Amino acid sequence: MPPEVFHSHPLVTPLIPILPRVPPKSELKRTLQNKYCQGGRMKFTKRKLIPVLVFILLSASILRLLKLTILTSSPSLPPAGSPPFRQQKCPSLSPICRNNIPPANANASILTEKENRFLLDLVSRRIPCKLLVFGLEPRYLSLASLNAGGFTVFIEDNPEKISTMKATNKTSVYKVEYQTIAAEAYKLLKHARENPDCSPKFRLSKLSRCKLALTNLPREVYNTKWDVVVVDGPRGDTPDSPGRMAAIYTAGILARKGNVTDIIVHDVDRMIEKWFSWEFLCEKNLVSSKGRFWNFRILGEPNATTFCTI
């Protein structure tokens, strides 16, 4: 019996290579970020960030320069309730003041159908009433007819318009001479804010020392407690023409001496009408509007010392 032969197998290297250890996902992500993102950030900072910053700073400088140019070339009237003017001058006929007055518009005096209906409806709710109208325009003659049970007074500075109107027992027309022009609006608003004589506690009279006060009106106008006041005169469409500063101021004074007064201001798309309405009729009293009409309803305050309260 042959002896048993023990076969030994040589050590053979496996054909499948041993794979390296796979790092965890978090470690792989951190490695990639360190390799690519950080390098990209450095590259972006050096090559792209500086030009972007330069562009932003340059754009900001240009915008600031444009803003300063606009503010210095065409200043606007400040809003109501803002602090008094300081170190600002506006000669009455300077180009700056002239720029604040819009050019004349041939269609400015024409009411739209909605504006006309708005005005008629408002007056209809108050008739018979005491109606005061600044500006004698043909379209407002219908208001006098509508208010046949009350009485109507027109204030006009144009003699030609006055000559075409016949006064009746219920309708009167008074001529007024305005002492200010539209180009002086900026200076007059400053005067009214700084002068105690322009306070609403003072009654309007021929002795008034406020430059905005109409001192040459009949006593009937001063003593009447008006129900409705319409401000659509004088024209105020050129720098050298009488503006509506005094008319709006006077309407504000008269309303506070009455009971409840509706004041309707036309052409509020123009700067003077807008800012003087805010100043003397007050935003809190604005109850309705239509087109270029604003309607302020003011309660009587005979002892008021200021026009608008915050």
Image (cartoon, rainbow, N blue to C red):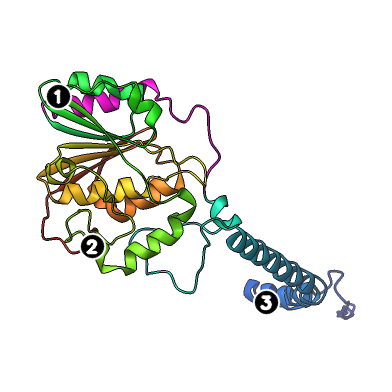
Which label belongs to residue 199? 2
- The answer, for residue 22, to whether it is visible in the render is no
* Disc 3: CA contacts within 10 A as few (<14), some (14-19) or many (>=20): few
Q: Nearer the viewer, residue 162 or 123?
A: 162
Would you name the residue on which mark 1 appears? 170
Q: CA distance from mark 1 to mark 2?
A: 32 Å
Which label belongs to residue 309? none
- The amino acid type found where label 2 is placed reads Ser
| Residue 110 included in the magenta stretch of the image | yes
On the image, the x and y values in percent for residue 115 come to 35, 27
Magenta span of residues: 101-128
Q: Which residue is pictured at 30% across the width and 24% down the height?
A: 140
Looking at the image, is mark 3 or mark 1 earlier in the sequence?
3
Would you name the residue on which mark 3 appears? 30
3 vs 2, front mark: 2
Query: Compared to 286, does 116 lie above or below?
Result: above
Query: Compared to 161, does 261 lie above or below?
Result: below
Say which quadrant the N terminus sits in.
bottom right
Check disc 2 and report its element: helix, strand or loop.
loop
**Circle 3/circle 2 CB separation < 8 Å:** no
Q: Nearer the viewer, residue 289 or 18?
A: 289
Looking at the image, is mark 3 or mark 2 earlier in the sequence?
3
Q: Is residue 308 left or right of residue 259?
A: right
- The amino acid type found where label 3 is placed reads Arg
* Disc 2: CA contacts within 10 A as few (<14), some (14-19) or many (>=20): some
| Residue 40, image quadrant | bottom right
Q: Is residue 71 left or right of residue 53?
A: left
